[in-house]
Image (cartoon, grey):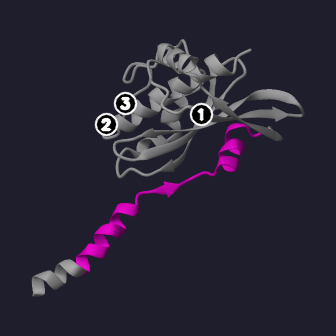
Amino acid sequence: MNRNLGLLFAMPLLGITQSVYAKDYLSVAEAQAVLFPTADTFLENVLTLTKDQKKAIKRLSGVRQRWDEQKVWRAEAGGQFLGWFMVDEVVGKHEFITYAAAISPEGHVLGVEVMSYRETHGYQVMEAGWRAHFVGKGVGDAFKLNDDVPNISGATLSCRNMTDGVHRLLALAEVMLKP
């Protein structure tokens, strides 16, 4: 009887510890302000991708585009086009990592910010120094983990999936957003 009573009290604590690691760091508006600090306008668009466009994205990035739609924002300052803001999700080890990427009109990464991190490990991908390795990269650049983007011990899956995700967003910009 005592053993069962102890389990009864421990059960609610197990549920609490699972949700402690999920944390939201930035809203869409906050991430937009960080990645495009001079922008005064963000025009939201929803891109609907065809099967051929999804195949082209995979061909360019090596990563499958899972969603049929992608929300993007055109960032402007005084009517001047600054670039594209995109929110994406990739799986870390078990849970989604929500991040935002800013892409220049020429198709290069201006910055990457983690908006929400739900994993128990691998949080090092939130460090600015690691994310800075993406800045300046274009779709044609190498994206090999450990060579072009450093791996972080204990965060390999988060590193790999964010690296693949950023490369996929660059391919999406190439296929869908370039004139």
Q: Are marks 2 and 3 in contact (CB under 8 Å)?
A: yes
Residue type highlighted by circle 3: Asn
- Residue 176 in percent (x, y) is at 65, 21
| Image disc number at residue 18 | none
- On the question of residue 137 being in view, the answer is no
Q: CA distance from mark 2 to mark 1?
A: 33 Å
Residue type highlighted by circle 2: Ser
160 relative to 116 in the view: left or right: left
127 relative to 8 in the view: left or right: right
The residue carrying mark 3 is 151
Q: CA distance from mark 3 to mark 1?
A: 30 Å
Characterize the local packing of mark 2: few (<14), some (14-19) or many (20 or more) Cα atoms within 10 angstroms.
few
Tell whether position 96 is magenta: no
Please give the name of the residue rendered at 39% of the width and 30% of the height, measured from the top-left corner: 160
Quadrant for residue 38, please give it: top right
* Residue span colored magenta: 9-37
- On the question of residue 165 being in view, the answer is yes
Quadrant for residue 6, please give it: bottom left
- Secondary structure at numbered mark 1: strand
| Image disc number at residue 153 | 2
Task: Determine whether 168 is above or below 120 in the image.
Answer: above
- N-terminal label among 2 and 1: 1
The residue carrying mark 1 is 69
- Residue 19 in percent (x, y) is at 40, 62
Please give the name of the residue rendered at 70% of the width and 17% of the height, measured from the top-left corner: 178
Q: CA distance from mark 2 to mark 3?
A: 6 Å
Please give the name of the residue rendered at 44% of the width and 57% of the height, measured from the top-left corner: 22
Quadrant for residue 64, please give it: top left
